[in-house]
Image: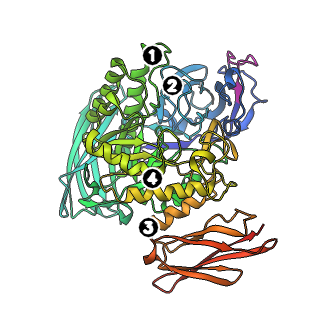
Amino acid sequence: MNDYGRITTEFNKSWRFMKLTKKDGLSELAFDVSDLDDSAWEEISLPHTWNSVDGADGISGEGEEKEGYYRGLGGYRKTFFFPEKEYAGKFVFIEFEGANTVTELFVNGSLAGRHEGGYSAFRFDITSLIVLGAENIFAVRVSNAPTDYIAPITEQGDFTKMGGIYRGVKIISANRVHIDLSDFGSSGIYITPKNISENHADTDVLVKLSNDGSESKSVTVSVNILNMDGCLAASEKQEITLSAKEKSQIEFSLSVENPILWNGKENPYLYTAEITVAGDGKILDGHREIFGIRTYRIDPENGFFLNGKYLDLRGVNYHQDSFENGWAMTDLQRERDYSMIREMGCTAVRMAHYQHARYEYDLCDRLGIAVWTEIGIVNKMSADATEKLAVSENFFNNARQQLTELIRQNYNHPSVIVWGISNELHQMTDEIWDIYTKLHDFAKSEDKTRLTTFADCQFWGKFLQLPADVVGYNRYFGWYKDAGPAEKFGEWLDLYHREKESRPICVSEYGGGGALSQFKDNIDWQEEIDPWGKRHYQNYQSAMHEKIWAQFAERKYLWGKFIWCMFDFASDGRNEGDTHGQNDKGLATRERVKKDVFYFYKSVWSSEPMVHLTEKKFTPRDSIIPQIKAYSNGESAELFVNGISRGVIKSTDLDSGYQTVFVWKNDEIINGAENEILVRSFFPDGTILEDSAVWTGI
């Protein structure tokens, strides 16, 4: 693909792969040499992970598989021919969109670079290592073995850390003068709208430049801002002289008149900044960067405001994981997932617990979904088993690198509202406090326009005092017994809001497990739910969420509410409910089958007409059913059992607080026979929707 003066080539096909396991004596294999016979290696395409199967089967092991899945080395090899006509005189980079956790690249037997961290994009300059007009050998060594300095450290984090080159790879060639490609994987372009009103928006554009040539060069840098119709909204150009081997930057201040604001789902309007670098009468480099113009603020009493208007930030936590191929997700799979998130009526998503794929942020920009995104500090900074909790020498530098990559690579996304520093940190010493504080201060220096946050699960002492602009609480009332019953959630939040926290607070995680095949009438939470065990009744999950959301809906001071989580996901150490190797707190299964609770939230959050009969697979049933429940956002609903009406309920008569939860109590079905259960819902515009199931009476 030609993009002005640069060429971008997909680099994902015709790779060879092999696990370089210690037990097979392969971890020390010199696999980067040109004459290695790799014909027996597996032929694969990227993205790829070696944990798509064993990372979600719940089987324990030892050594490199002691966490239940392989955490070790993998080797990738590929040959590529660089045509001299296309690449002569060019500077050539390779871009990895994500590889977990430590990646080393060798080109024709020489080390091109090493990257430590599993979630961000990174690039290596391979100009001096490639041979034009010949086949070149690319060898990549990736390790997802646990470390004590790359967050999340050791075994921390309740999710499978899948290894491999699990996102795509590109070759980028550019002229000697180009927009900087070595700025922590970023575009090298930073767009900052400010002084925003209905009539006007100042838009600062910073462009980082690099002259990798041996001579000084004078160039003209142009910025054109285009609206969604492709019409010019603003433009400016400047000249700059770059010395040989110099990196520099140039700043523009443009005025966009009568801007159309990025306004969430209501109108996710986007502009395009078209940047070109010209010299010697031709375009030397160029890039298009998408951005949005918007303001937001978070109030400790009244929640989140987008462009001056209150917006109920409600949504889900989301892990990068699919049942088809684990972390090696395709963009089509991401689109499917976000289509379900949008269908449910979400206005926000928390990307847990690390930087996600670039395309995911693009999706949120286009869909109008606000984003909380964070780095991978989960639970611990220290692997030290003593009371000292000494932190590894390299931990801070790597965490700062992760934070730099997160911010610089996602700076221009209007959907991103908060940078997260940590999740459920439960260690505290002066050293840990100092590291966290430095990371927070660094985030504020990197981006002066956004807020910082963290997700807390400790709620006492210095954990409550960690520096952040806004705070999130991970709390599982109604699920884990030490939290308390679901009915007490709001009371607990009021205490912290009133007495213990002056900053705006949100609920960053809440929820409970739901097994697709498990149902039971009249559940006693204290006696009949095993949070870490087998009994994860799906109808308890939905009833618990009903109780919790009723309390959240009354508390406008909550700036956000994020369910844990959208989909069941790979967590190989778990063996709960009716699955192995998964966390089953999702609103849908890992296979994207929607649970009843999905429809509860859709009934409350979405304006799309819907009706859903719950517990469809709960059969056989007792002949006297304690309750038959349906979710609908219609104005009334009618239940039929074997064609006979059991009554119409009007939404205005409901006392649930939602007017979407319709319940018929103590209805009787026929023993020993199949019974047709049907719910019909009526809407103001005349629409009538139905949902049904067949239950056998016993």
The residue to which callout 2 is attached is: 153
- Establish if 362 lies above or below 573: below
The residue to which callout 1 is attached is: 392
What is the C-alpha distance between the residues marked 2 and 4? 36 Å
Q: Which residues are magenta?
A: 18-30
Q: Which of the 4 image quarters holds residue 617?
A: bottom right
User: What is the number of the mark on residue 658?
Assistant: 3
- Magenta region includes residue 176: no
SS for tag 1? loop
- Pick whichever of labels 2 and 4 is earlier in the sequence: 2
Mark 3: few/some/many CA within 10 Å (<14, 14-19, 20+):
some
Amino acid type indicated by mark 1: Ser
Whether pointer 2 and pointer 1 mark residues with C-beta atoms closer than 8 Å, the reply is yes
Whether pointer 2 and pointer 4 mark residues with C-beta atoms closer than 8 Å, the reply is no
Near-viewer residue (127 or 56): 56
What is the C-alpha distance between the residues marked 4 and 1? 42 Å
- Pick whichever of labels 2 and 3 is earlier in the sequence: 2
Residue at image point 38% right, 27% down: 400
Q: Is residue 205 left or right of residue 672?
A: left
The residue to which callout 4 is attached is: 487
